[in-house]
Image (tube, grey):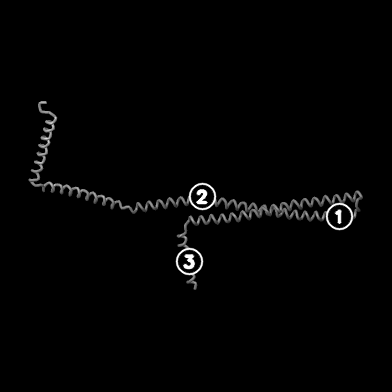
Amino acid sequence: MNVFKRLFKMGEAEAHSAIDKLEDPIKLTEQGIRDLKKDLDSSLKALAEVKAMGIRSKNDFQTHKNKATDYESKAMLILKKAESGDISVDEADRLASEALVKKEESLQHMNRAKAEQDRFDKNVAQLDLSVKKIKTNISKYENELKTLKARVRVSETTKKLNKQMAQIDSSGTVSMLERMKEKVAQDEALAEAYGDIANENRSLDDEIDSVIGSSEAEGKAATDLAALKAKLGMNKEG
């Protein structure tokens, strides 16, 4: 049974390795940035909530502090009324004691609110550091992503160009040009040979007719010129 488990683990590890090779680092980085932004949203929400509780505790502290001061003032006023004879001493002592009890309760609430405020302020400071760290990491990773994308474009372009250059057969191209030059030279020589053959195939009669035809043309031209001069009354002496 353990053997099968080990084989399964080995296969699972190999599968993960194959998947890692297929994963796009750009997509992974983009996903990581999206996750960080979600964490940032959550941290900002938590920071706002803790700040709100801290503000509430601060307000509670001030409220209970004011109440404690107010109850103390009321107790003093009651004792003064007893001193002036407005109320009995026993009644003044009772009411003043009740006021001082209320003052003590307010002081306890004030101390509790102060402790909560201090704790919330500490939590706010910690959350604020976390938010700043996440923001720094997001900015850092976004800049690294831009660099990574640029490097990928350069590497892909370079790879494409190098592949094209590697596929060019320089020796084959030179060989093809040499064959073309040889064919052109052969065609030129063949054309010249056909011309020589054509000249050799002309008969004696063709040569004679060619000469006669040229002489007849020159004689006719001379006759036409003499006729034109006679028509115009021109002669050699004139």
Q: Position of residue 201 (x, y in %)?
A: 11, 48
Residue at the spot x=84%, y=56% of the render? 98
Q: Which residue is tagged 1?
A: 95
Residue at the spot x=12%, y=46% of the render? 199
Label 3 near label 2: C-beta < 8 Å?
no
Q: Name the amino acid, label 2.
A: Asn
Would you say 104 lies left or right of 220 here?
Answer: right
Disc 2 packing (10 Å; few <14; some 14–19; many ≥20): few
Query: SS of the residue at dot 3?
Result: helix
Q: Which residue is tagged 3?
A: 12
Disc 1 packing (10 Å; few <14; some 14–19; many ≥20): some
- Using the image, tell me which numbered label, if any, was put on residue 143: 2
Q: Position of residue 114 (x, y in %)?
A: 72, 53
Against 58, residue 238 (above or below) is above
Q: Name the amino acid, label 3.
A: Glu
**Is tag 3's residue or tag 1's residue first in the polypeptide sequence?**
3
Q: CA distance from mark 2 to mark 1?
A: 71 Å
Please name whichever residue, 115 or 196, is drawn nearer the observer in this view of the structure. 196
